[in-house]
Amino acid sequence: MDLGIKGKRAWVMAASSGIGKAIAKELIKEGARVAISARNPETLQKTADEIGAELAIPANFLKPGGATAAGSEIVARWGGVDILVTNAGGPPKGGFLDIGTDGWQVGFQGLFLSAVEAMQVVLPGMKESKWGRVIYITSIAAKEPIGKLTVSNGIRAGILGLMKSVSHECASYGITFNSILPGYTATERLKELGVTNDEIARNVPAKRLAQPEEVGQLCAFLASDRAGYLNGQAIALDGGQTHGL
Ligand code: NAD
């Protein structure tokens, strides 16, 4: 199936490893020109060389203005971005009583404001060209709270509100906004969270982890020309884990 994105300019945030890297790889496979960002310049360049990303623009999304600076550099080099994939490192772990205001600020900057900054940079160009795709990588926590991930539960749900608002505002410009909500996915973050095989067997009807490539494939479809009427949707990629609709 031709996804119709050959030559489209895609920026994938937080893409030196895991889910972001798999998405970048899939978009490159579909013929898109891809820019990737992440914090560590050496690791980022290594990933770019490995997968064939055209641009590797280092950025710290925990720093206010970090996404604005990276996005502006990409727009300056390319003249615009057609496909934006917002992604970020995981937020601080803990229950509500474990997390101080500082932890919430870190989570808000990393998960929410970095996406807002990136959208502010790329949306004017998408509006002008009357074509654009914005895909938010969040978590099933956006729909169903996960124990001891209070910051993630609170802020990722807010991303869905943001997505709905902008999808209403911008649909007539040919721009779509959708979210992917991964469940347990085989990456470094999962190791960091210490999720056990027992928990996976108990909670995931599919009885296995998602592979990052599966997130990449869904993201490439949402970025495609064929998905032009699919807008404002939150899609859980979770092996059947979430209970709600
Ligand atoms: P990962 O650790 O493999 O990748 C994280 C990426 O973010 C890396 O490229 C890293 O360099 C980059 N990064 C981290 N901090 C950064 C910063 N301050 N500025 C710029 N880049 C930064 O993890 P992953 O599993 O691919 O996670 C990606 C996102 O998906 C995270 O927000 C995570 O919480 C979420 N998520 C993961 C799972 C899972 O099971 N793996 C499930 C649901 C949601």
Image: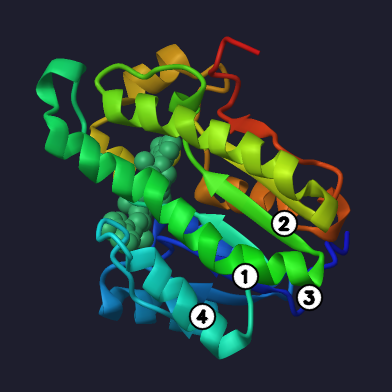
Q: Amino acid at mark 4?
A: Ile
Tag shown at residue 6: 3
Mark 4 crowdedness (10 Å alpha carbons): few <14, some 14-19, many ≥20: many
User: Which callout, 1 or 4, points at the residue further toward the start of the chain?
Assistant: 1
User: Which callout, 3 or 4, points at the residue further toward the start of the chain?
Assistant: 3
Q: Amino acid at mark 3?
A: Lys
In which quadrant will I find the C terminus?
A: top right
Between marks 1 and 4 in the image, the one whose residue lies nearer the viewer: 4
Mark 3 crowdedness (10 Å alpha carbons): few <14, some 14-19, many ≥20: some
Instruction: Label 3: state its secondary structure.
Output: loop
Evaluate if marks 1 and 2 touch, with contact meaning CB atoms under 8 Å apart.
yes
Instruction: Label 2: state its secondary structure.
Output: loop
Q: Which residue bears the numbered disc 2?
A: 223
Q: Is residue 24 left or right of residue 42?
A: right
Q: Does 167 appear above or below 55?
A: above
Query: Residue 157 or 126: which is nearer the viewer?
Result: 126
User: Which callout, 1 or 2, points at the residue further toward the start of the chain?
Assistant: 1
